[in-house]
Amino acid sequence: MNWLSALGCLDDSGTGSLPDSVFERALLAFRLKMSNSEVKMFVGALKRCPPPMEQLVPLSSFEDKLVEASRSVDVLQLERWFKLLLEPVSSNVAITLRGCDEQMTGSISHADFCKALLELVDSISDEQMTLLLHVAGKTESAEVDYMDFADAFGAPPPPPPPPDVSWPEEAQVPGTPEAPGIDDDTLNSFFTCSGTLG
């Protein structure tokens, strides 16, 4: 998505900035897997002056943050660490997280998310768990979108074993005709004819 074009459509004043409330509603409408509180915190960080001195958010600040995030060595190192941490149990990530979703809503509480990850990797420290919670996608109500997390850091479970297609003796159809026998003279005639045609 071209974020600046999408947000620029909301800039009725043509100043290259948006009121913070408009900016927040736009980010929530884009469904970026951020909770309401995370969106407010992010938009607040984009302001050049702390409130109430300025309530407008420059679109250029948003662009700068996108470029900064895409080039951040810290972000790349965190992603690599998350994948290394969960790689040994990657095929169970989605299954374990889904097991906490009794209502099958696609999201779970922070407590259930942490509990599920500790079942997978019991050596995760509190600090590491905080980082995992930060990167996990959220609903607007701040629950964890666990399938988004599983897609990013897990792996699909292995396919089930193929079904047993062998037929028991009693299920076989009686009286199945056998292939007719071919004598040596017929075979010799066949090969002679094949060589002639070839």
Image: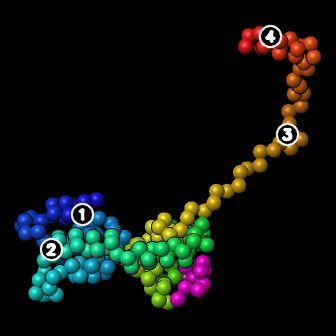
The amino acid at mark 1 is Trp
What residue is drawn where x is 85% and y is 39%? 171
Q: Position of residue 122 (x, y in %)?
A: 60, 84
Label 1, label 2: how far apart the Cα atoms are: 13 Å
116 inside magenta stretch:
yes
- Amino acid type shown at disc 2: Pro
**Along the line of sight, the residue nearer the viewer: 167 or 129:** 129
**Rendered view: 191 above or below 57:** above
Residue 37, numbered label: none
Position in image of residue 153 (x %, y %) = 50, 70
The answer to whether the residue labelled 2 contacts the one labelled 4, judged by CB atoms less than 8 Å apart, is no
Q: Residues within 10 Å of mark 2 (few under 14, many from 20)?
A: some
For label 2, the SS is strand
Q: Which residues are magenta?
A: 115-125
The amino acid pointed to by label 3 is Ala
Badge count: 4
Give above or below for 72 relative to 126. Answer: above
Q: Quadrant of residue 185?
A: top right
Q: Quadrant of the N terminus?
A: bottom left
Residue, disc 2: 58
Residue 5 spot, x, y in % from top left: 19, 60
The residue that disc 4 covers is: 193
Disc 1 target residue:
3
N-term mark: 3 or 1: 1
Q: Considering only order in the chain, which callout, 2 or 1, is on the residue closer to the N terminus?
A: 1
Q: Earlier in the sequence, mark 1 or mark 4?
A: 1
Residue 107 seen from this side: no
As shown in the figure, which amino acid type bears the numbered disc 4? Cys
Q: Quadrant of residue 11?
A: bottom left
Q: Nearer the viewer, residue 179 or 103?
A: 179
